[in-house]
Image (tube, rainbow, N blue to C red):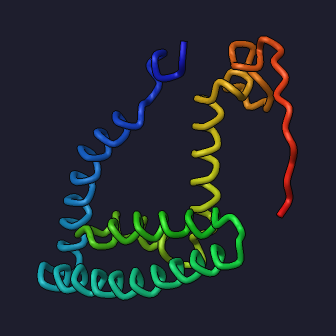
Amino acid sequence: MTATRRGGLRPTRVVALLLLVVPVLEVMALVAVGQVIGGWPTFFLLVAISVLGAWLIRREGARAWGALVEALRNGRMPARELADGVLVLIGGTLLLTPGFLTDVVGFALVVPVTRPVARRLLETVITKRLLAQSPYLAGGSGRIGPDRTGPTARGDVIEGEIVDD
């Protein structure tokens, strides 16, 4: 039995829950800020944050794209650069969404100072997900090696040659 069958949180359930909870929290935050500083200042603050976010997305997106092109040009695997691109894309989407809470998370994903923390979190989530779903990785236990139900369980030997260019 897999983790998703046992009643664990599936990604679609998490997204559905977030789509229900985040707007309610955003409205609560907007009302709270509006009560403290007023309606028009809250509106102008949201516009200013969106403009700053759009500028930051453009700058960091261009940097991420340049780093990706440079990695490919040098012939190395661009894992870090791809992760940065994904984080800038997700963070940019959150920054362009009206609301203070999504802006905080968006800035955390886009700003170069906090992006390494988000990148490590993304790598951890992806690694755990891959280990849990791969038949080649010890039944999802985190131990790398063939699973007893995988294609190498029969003892097949695959011969090959390593070519280093």
Instruction: Relative to 143, say whether 23 is above or below.
Output: below
Q: Where's the N terminus, which quadrant? A: top right
Position of 52 with respect to 98 (left or right) is right
Residue at 83%, 64% in the rendered image: 165
Residue at 40%, 80% in the rendered image: 57
Residue at 28%, 39% in the rendered image: 16
Provide residue 142's location: percent of width, then percent of height: 73, 31
Instruction: Relative to 19, say whether 42 is above or below.
Output: below
Q: Quadrant of residue 116?
A: bottom right
Foreground residue among 121 and 133? 133
Position of 122 with respect to 90 (left or right) is right
Residue at 27%, 87% in the rendered image: 48
Foreground residue among 120 and 130? 130
Position of 56 with respect to 2 (left or right) is left
Q: Quadrant of residue 29?
A: bottom left
Provide residue 45's location: percent of width, then percent of height: 25, 83
Provide residue 67's location: percent of width, then percent of height: 60, 79
